[in-house]
Image (cartoon, grey):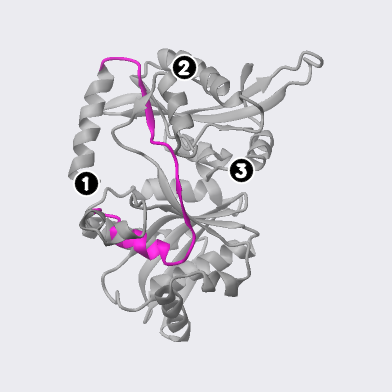
Amino acid sequence: MEVREIKDKKIWEDFLEKCKEKTFLQSFNWGEFNKMMGNKIWRLGFYEIPKSKPQIPNLIGVSLVVKVSAKRGTFLFVPHGPLIEFQIPNSKFQFLKSLLEELKKLAKKERCNFIRIAPILEKNEENEKIFKELGFRDAPIHIHPEITWELDISKPEEEILKGMRKTTRYLIRQALKNKEIEILKSERIEDLEEFNKIYQETAKRHRFVSFSFDYLKNEFLAFKDDKQILIILGKYKGEVVCGGVFVFWQKIGFYHHGASLQKHFKIPTSYLMIWEAIKEAKGRGCEKFNFWGIAPISSNIELKTSKFWKHPWAGLTLFKMGFGGEKKEYIKTKDLPISPRYWFCYLVEKIRKKKRGL
């Protein structure tokens, strides 16, 4: 196997088209976003060299790698990756082993304390075993969702509505009748500023660490030229009361950032906003709608337990589930310590996680 850096956007995106399980966190534009944030990145391509035609290498896997420099430590990060053509027999372990060898060399060169991978692999014994054999351990926190909620939107609109929780469907229809509710779709930076106001207020209310406006702006600019990002704001009586930032990439719509005000919370503006986002995704040819992260759940019975309701994402999780769909759970984020400094980072992140109630 040969490793090469990929600079060509078309080669990168064309390969990702063939991958079934994926998110925009491995997209070419997410790499551009990270560069805008001042992070060093590598787009690694893994090529199989056929003995019969060595001059025509076969690209079998890719991995966006980001160097993260923080006060707690410096590390290499693979967000929701790597991605590989899994139909190749017995390729998963060998591919991940090759990736790890490359990451170790890179980590040494970049003076990193550890390697972190957020795999987009189904949570099962086989996948957990592979990472254990490669020397990885569970990370103390996750940076991107390990449990998401996804809806099949390839069906007609009426069928999608029928698959929703009865209350959700009722509130959407009530909102459609309410002439004081307005949904605004925008690609203007000024409307991102409007979203940011309610987003920061939402973060204070729910006590989570929000992204900075620079983060939101750079993400917006990274996807804007390809028409892959949209701001949707929900207004009631002319006032913005909810909003979302949605990414549309390779036939999947993503509800990446959301916010709402406590004011007028009984008015179902947010339900209509999400319904309009789903319809927008369908109109763009998307077949799936990804609601992003949800709280850990194993069954409907668990939704009634006090443990679930203590989770800071409990209300948001029920809101997302109301639109229909299914849970997708990936194996936990994995760390490979490189230096003793890793354990300081581990302790800091463990404390942060406890403080956030996660």
The first of marks 1 and 3 along the sequence is 3
* Quarter occupied by the N terminus: top right
Q: Residue at position x 64%, y 35% from top? A: 12
- Residue occupied by mark 3: 20
**Labels 3 and 2 touching (C-beta < 8 A):** no
Is residue 41 one of those drawn in magenta?
A: no
Distance in Å between CA atoms under marks 2 and 1: 32 Å
Type of the residue with mark 2: Leu
Q: Residues within 10 Å of mark 1 (few under 14, many from 20)?
A: few
- Residue occupied by mark 1: 356
Distance in Å between CA atoms under marks 1 and 3: 33 Å
Residue 133 percent coordinates (x, y): 43, 19
Q: Residue at position x 38%, y 79% from top? A: 238
Residue 223 percent coordinates (x, y): 54, 48
Residue 150 percent coordinates (x, y): 49, 55
Q: Secondary structure at mark 3?
A: loop
Is residue 338 one of those drawn in magenta?
A: yes
The first of marks 2 and 1 along the sequence is 2
Type of the residue with mark 1: Arg
Q: Which residues are magenta?
A: 311-340
Q: Quadrant of residue 158?
A: bottom right
Does residue 98 lie above or below 162 as drawn? Answer: above
Residue 302 versus residue 231: which sits nearer the camera? 302
| Residue 106: image tag | 2
Type of the residue with mark 3: Lys
